[in-house]
Image (spheres, rainbow, N blue to C red):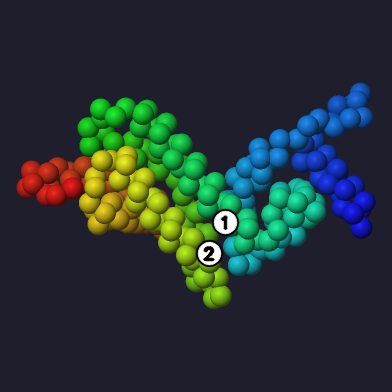
Amino acid sequence: MQKKIDIQHYFVHYKLSKKISRGNSMPKIVNHEKYKTEILAKCVDILARRGYSAVSMREIAAELDVSTGTLYHYFATKEDIFKELVKFVLNKDIEELQIHSKGDLGQTLETRIESLFQMVQAREAYFQNLLYIICDVSRLKNHEEEKSLIADTIKEYVHIITKHLGVTNPALNRILISVILGTVVQRILDSEAISLSETSDVVKDFLSILLSNSFTF
């Protein structure tokens, strides 16, 4: 049995890398973390399109064009994929926000708001897919661990926005997240309804009014 598993793992590496030299029978070293990340990135689209509750591990593997053994080598269950996906998404969003903000701590609040919305706008389809997955998972029964993970992730996003904008009022940061998600949802229903740049302008005007009235951030 152990020998069979070892052989399977060898071909897992072959299947994923697809970088076997034609003149060399020895496979190149596989960067497991890199391939795991690539799988997770592709799973965002797969789970959004097929539905988290409906798609099976076998179907996910087929979409990825890998064997089920390959997929199980990296993830024991579909739930494990979701858990790892949440971590991957959160880290990716932090990186993207840093890129759009250009790491300039001297930015004005208005500029930081713009960079936040620009990041979302640049990855709008990606955020729409995340919402599909979150909504699908949230309505499932007996999946409390996944729901708890979603709640914790939302709290982490509040923390990220707090750090990025320098706005320490947690209620205001939650409202900003609601505005962003609401705009993304509205554009799913009607892409011509409102743009993220328009929402950004409204938010900047709103915060400007609050600032002029000495609202506590």
Q: Position of residue 104 (x, y in %)?
A: 32, 27
Q: CA distance from mark 2 to mark 1?
A: 7 Å
Residue at 92% in and 30% down: 25
Q: Residue furthest front?
A: 2
Q: Is residue 95 above or below residue 148?
A: above
Residue at 43% in and 61% down: 151
Q: Which residue is mark 2?
A: 146
**Does dot 1 land on a helix, a strand or a loop?**
helix
Quarter of the image for residue 49 reads bottom right
Q: Is residue 55 above or below residue 34?
A: below
Q: Is residue 54 above or below residue 14?
A: below
Q: Are marks 2 and 1 in contact (CB under 8 Å)?
A: yes
Quarter of the picture containing the N terminus is bottom right
**Does dot 2 land on a helix, a strand or a loop?**
helix
Q: Residue furthest bottom?
A: 141
Residue at 26% in and 41% down: 166
Q: Position of residue 108 (x, y in %)?
A: 22, 32
Amino acid identity at mark 1: Lys
Viewer can see residue 193: no
Amino acid identity at mark 2: Glu
Q: Position of residue 72 (x, y in %)?
A: 75, 55
Q: Residues within 10 Å of mark 2 (few under 14, many from 20)?
A: some
Q: Give left or right: position of 208 versus 84.
A: left
Q: Which residue is mark 1?
A: 83
Q: Residues within 10 Å of mark 1 (few under 14, many from 20)?
A: some
